[in-house]
Image: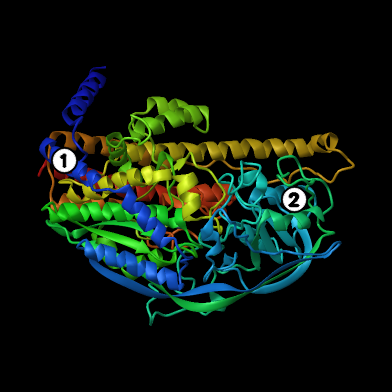
Amino acid sequence: MKIVIAALYLMVNINVATADNILGYDKESSNVQRELEAQMDANIDAREMDEWLRHLSVLPHHAGSAAGKKNAEFIAALFESWGYTVEIAEYQVLLPTPKIREVKLLEPTQFSASLTEDSIAEDPSTSRREHLLPPYNAFSVDGEVEGELVFVNYGIPEDYELLERHGISVAGKIVIAKYGKSWRGIKPKLAGEKDAIGALIYSDPADDGYGAGDVYPKGPFKHESGIQRGSVMDMPTYPGDVLTPGRGATKNAIRLNREDAPTITKIPVLPMSYRDALPLLAAMDGEVVPAEWQGGLPITYHFGPGPARVRLKAKFNWDMVTAYNVIARLEGSRYPDEWVIRGNHHDGWNHGAADPLSGMVATLAEAKAVANLARQGHRPQRTIIYAAWDAEEPGLIGSTEWAEDHAADLKKHAVAYVNTDGTSRGFIYIGGSHVLERFFNQIIEDVDDPRSELSLKERRRAYEMIFGEDDATKTEAAERSDLRIYPLGSGSDYTPFLQHLGIASANISFSGEANGGSYHTLYDTYEHYTKWSDPGLVYGSTLAKVTGRAALRLANAPRLPFEFNGFVDNIAKYVAELQTLADEMRDSTTKTSRLIADGIYAAALDPTKTLGAPAENEPVPHFNFAPLLNALGSLQSAADDFDTAVARHQANSVEINRLLYTSERLLTRDTGLEGRPWYKHHIYAPGFYTGYGVKTIPGVREAIEQREYEKVEPQIEIAADVLNLMTERIKLLADRISHQ
Ligand SMILES: [Zn+2]
């Protein structure tokens, strides 16, 4: 009892003592820092951002295009004019562009898909089609195939389980899948693994077309001709240039032969509009799909196969192009060898106003404001590097090649990487390394929502309390003092920094109040963005205030603002999830086997329909989670020791900061994840079968999910080892801070 009271007393003291201080700063330096931030805010100019947005989105500016290169030069000139040391880092990368795209319905009726998007009078940008790439999926293999169609819903693993229950195989067929529910590259990957010969992906109007709201130009949702472009490279294996995994794609780099590049799809794939998909789906027959599979087109959807028979032809120019990364550096005044990195990509699929320019212009506004401070004598103490990446869209290529090229230096010098990309309006959305959870919570306490009197944190909390995905989330939002930052999977340029190099990272945007259907279509224009996504760029300029604080606080902190109790709390949540996952799988597997054995499925299912019982699985054994649970216990006590130490001592030193910022590296292992050694982080990875979707503690989680039972306990040992290294580091830090 006595111990508990002492602990409480101590906690109260800590809160009082540090309530107003920025993590890693004392009272005086916090005041100085907040003063600088107020000056930075005053320098962020939404009208100037609007001018840049208009200018950079005038023409399609994909990687390898003339406008893309011009945009890189324009951005470089801006940085230079503000006093940055600028370099355009060039990489030679393989980038397929479409040569032949054909989708023809051959039987029972005939139809040729247009595969093009309409210009519309209300949006002049949609008529500026100079160098416009037609809709395609980058890194589809070349191919010409003919076969019956099978409708596979979203084409994710559970959809194939249902098809199997209906006795439907996609072997030798062409699948047609809806966009959504997974990253798009998963769809041809899974279809190929199931021996399909081709894949079509279309946007169903129920998801982001007229079923979701008014379509463009009346509303922001998808025009009937809108086609989502995008990469289908196998990024969960490795992102970046397909020919140079693990090394920078410099001029003389050793390259794979294209035939040997494992991240190019195995089957040809093309994207479509719902206008083009309608005649294909209408020509299909076979059993009617379940209600959850039915989409928004005015037909009844059928599984097939056939009788719709389709020819799909996709041929590409497999050209080498130059990717232009703009790297702008502001040397730190005190610790030039410690680097804070801020990045956003500059290439877009078309005009790319939302993706990526909305984030790019916020990054520019921030960089200009930071440079202004430097000119007034407040140069950041650590080096800040602003990066405008090229070739993100085809597969995080520019950032990955730069990170691979500079891997050794980055591991040594990089303090953190903060990413932005497309942003709109609504609620602040922060994903990242959990050692930065407290740090980011303080920032969103300090920045106000532009449409209310509330802080960004209060608004986000209110959102979670009302719209949180389940009751537990809603309750937690009301009760937990810090809002959780979400774990990062993939989908933007943080991936090489976090998951390949082990650099603490974050990804920040606003969203939630501007849903629409312009993503990766011809309609992602200045007109669409400024009308529907963020009129006046008020959220864009707020984003600059958030990320500007992140960059400056990291750059100026006497002690780097890493914190471990938030980290432990999140890891504990993931470990509990893993145990629940195993328990629930065990129960449902046993139950299903019993229902099959007892003939219950046979008795319940309609004998005139094709739906059969699910496949029977091996019983799920009990796993020993003790190594992870023990590791968690030690980690918790180390994190407590660290908090006690920093509450009592203002200690900081180059050595302490180095131990802090390299702590994230300890969560990586050189050998990487099983089957995908490029991914070295053992806490965060994109799912092998979800793509962008994160898998936390991925070695263990994916072994359970994929029912590779013999791998589960070895993976638990590995995850425990990784956490134990982190525990040792935190203890060492607590010790150094207490005895400096
Ligand atoms: Zn983007």
Give the residue at mark 1. Answer: 35
Q: Please, which residue is most extreme toward the bottom here?
A: 252
Instruction: Establish if 508 lies above or below 636.
Output: below
Q: Quarter of the image containing the C terminus?
A: top left
Of circles 1 and 2, the one toward us is: 1
Q: Please, which residue is most extreme toward the right here?
A: 608
The numbered disc on residue 163 is 2
Instruction: Establish if 248 lies above or below 632.
Output: below
For residue 323, side relative to residue 383 (left or right) = right
Name the element at disc 2. Answer: helix
Q: Nearer the viewer, residue 710 or 351?
A: 351
Residue at 70% x, 49% y is: 161
Name the element at disc 1. Answer: helix
* Neighbourhood count class around disc 1 (C-alpha, 10 Å): few under 14, some 14–19, many 20 upward: few
Residue at 65% x, 68% y is: 268
Q: Position of residue 491 (x, y in %)?
A: 47, 55
For residue 433, side relative to residue 554 (left or right) = right
Residue 667 visible, this orientation: no
**Quadrant holding ligand 1?**
bottom left
Q: CA distance from mark 1 to mark 2?
A: 61 Å
What amino acid is labelled 1 in the image?
Glu
Q: Position of residue 628 (x, y in %)?
A: 41, 42
Q: Give the image quarter of residue 456.
A: top left
Q: Position of residue 186 (x, y in %)?
A: 59, 57
